[in-house]
Image (cartoon, helix red, strand yellow):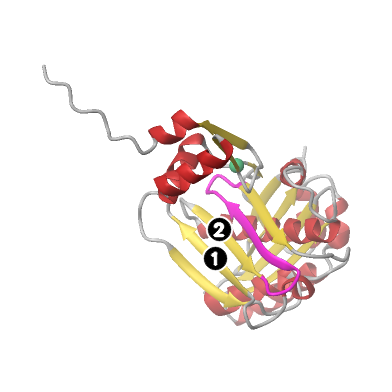
Amino acid sequence: MGIAFADNLTRFVFERAAVRGAVVSLDAAYRDILACHPYPPGLQRLIGETLAAVCLLADSLKFEGSLILQLHGSRTLRLLVVEASAALELRATAQWDGEIGEHAQLCDLAGNGGESRMVLTLDPKDGGPLYQGVVALEGGSVAALFEHYLATSEQIDSRLWLSADDRRVRGLLVQRMPASGEADTGPWRRAARAAATASAVFETSDAHAALESLFPTDDVRAFRPRMPRFGCSCSRERVAAALKLLGSTEVESILAERGGIGVNCEFCNRRYELDAAEARNLFAAPPAAVLH
Ligand SMILES: [Zn+2]
């Protein structure tokens, strides 16, 4: 029995070469994210490919916080944010302005150079320092952008294949490990070739079958699969904290206009409502200590 190839991320290593990688499949997780907002089909595909890439990257980092990717575009696509937690909970949101063609590539939507850039943030979530990397939007596709990032920022030779439609996303990452030598060149070439022609194998029903058809002549060891899913970390407490940052003057002016405050989470679109008393209470002085 294989492992059903839906909402699955399976990491693997070559037994006899310094080559590693992972295959990812997003099904319900992807559809749940798309259900939050009415994205045009061309943007759905771009979100899907970016979700798969961020998921593969988050898994390879062995990091206990969140990985946050922001694409700042200078054309139709203004902003795309994709986040993955250490538990592979995924969420996404986008801002765009104008028509998006069904087969548009990242470079068509976001532009190259100038204001266009990718910002990757590692948020340890424990109050520790953020790590942030910024790269220009190079390459025409999401896969090319991540390959460029991995080669320049992480110094790891990587090949990435990504595919998304309106129902599901598939991805394959292969990497030549830094310790690899001359003997690994053959296996690495085979792995890179597999990444270039991966489409067909993703019709298989499970991750192990996909790995067997991707690498028919290499011994490949698959790790225990992980299950990416949609998850949003928004909460009433976070909305309250954001309103506190906004300040009491601003909050009072919203109350004067609307009588209450409604905030929609930009990721999952969940709505949080505070009435005037609840909103004012955010700025009330803490209660005095009770003396016994
Ligand atoms: Zn949310």
The x and y percentages for residue 203 are 87, 51
Q: Mark 1 or mark 2, which is nearer the start of the sequence?
A: 2
- Quadrant of the displayed image that contains ligand 1: top right
Q: Give the magenta range.
A: 73-89
Image point (54%, 34%), residue name: 260
Q: Is residue 95 rendered to the left or right of residue 18?
A: right
Residue drawn at 67 percent across, 71 percent down:
73
Please say whether residue 203 is visible from this viewpoint.
yes
Residue 288 lies left or right of residue 148; in this view the side is left
Q: Which residue type does callout 1 highlight?
A: Leu
Number of numbered discs: 2
Residue closer to the observer: 262 or 74:
262
Q: Are marks 2 and 1 in contact (CB under 8 Å)?
A: yes
Q: Is residue 54 magenta?
A: no
| Callout 2 amino acid | Ile
Image quarter of residue 262: top right
Q: Which residue is situated farthest in the left direction here?
A: 292
Task: Identify the secondary structure beneath mark 2.
Answer: strand
Q: CA distance from mark 2 to mark 1?
A: 6 Å
Residue, disc 1: 120
Q: Quadrant of residue 119?
A: bottom right
Circle number at residue 68: 2
Camera sees residue 215:
no
